[in-house]
């Protein structure tokens, strides 16, 4: 795979971002967090990945969070999200984006 780190993008819907790491088939977002054993992703993590995937123009890419523990040196957990979760995450993101745009007067 040809991996691309820290790529910025803008999307026609009126948002942009900077992706930690991606290739043509995978989008990864790295998070550092206090944890010792278990870690979980939240809706905002999934929405972010879904928006990144759309922003990069790779609608079928797999999406995952890479959690790096600040509590235990060397502990890393990868959580890959299902396609259903990513699709739901994009719908959630889209509606929040529209709300924000309307509240700020951007049409």
Image (cartoon, rainbow, N blue to C red):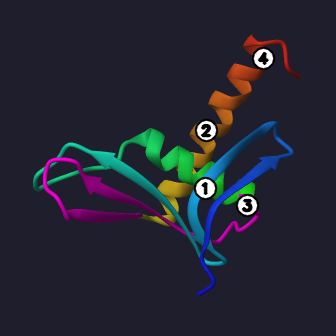
Can you name the residue that lies furthest to the front here? 73
Q: Which of 70 and 61 is in front in this view?
A: 70
Horizontally, is 67 left or right of 25 in the view? left
Residue 56, which numbered label?
A: 3
**Secondary structure state at the residue bearing disc 4:** helix
What residue lies at 54% left-to-right and 45% top-to-bottom? 47
* Residue interval drawn in magenta: 56-80
Q: Earlier in the sequence, mark 1 or mark 4?
A: 1
Question: Is 65 situated above or below 23?
Answer: above
Q: Earlier in the sequence, mark 3 or mark 2?
A: 3
**Secondary structure state at the residue bearing disc 2:** helix
Please say if the residues under marks 1 and 3 sit with CB atoms less than 8 Å apart. Answer: yes
Cα–Cα gap, marks 1 and 3: 9 Å
Judged by depth in the image, the label closer to the viewer, 1 or 3, is 1
What residue lies at 43% left-to-right and 41% top-to-bottom? 43
Residue 44 rendering spot, x and y as whole percentages = 46, 39
Q: Mark 1 points at which residue?
A: 19
Residue 77 within the magenta-colored segment of the rendering: yes
């Amino acid at each position: 795979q040809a991996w691309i780190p820290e790529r910025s993008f803008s999307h026609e819907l009126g948002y942009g971002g900077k992706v930690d790491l991606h290739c043509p088939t995978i989008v990864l977002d790295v998070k550092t967090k206090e944890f010792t054993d278990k870690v979980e992703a939240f809706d905002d993590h999934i929405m972010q990945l879904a928006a990144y995937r759309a922003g990069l123009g790779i609608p079928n890419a797999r999406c995952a969070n890479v959690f790096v523990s600040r509590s235990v040196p060397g502990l890393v957990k990868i959580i890959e999200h299902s396609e259903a979760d990513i699709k739901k995450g994009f719908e959630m993101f889209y509606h929040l984006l529209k709300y924000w745009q309307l509240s700020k007067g951007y049409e």
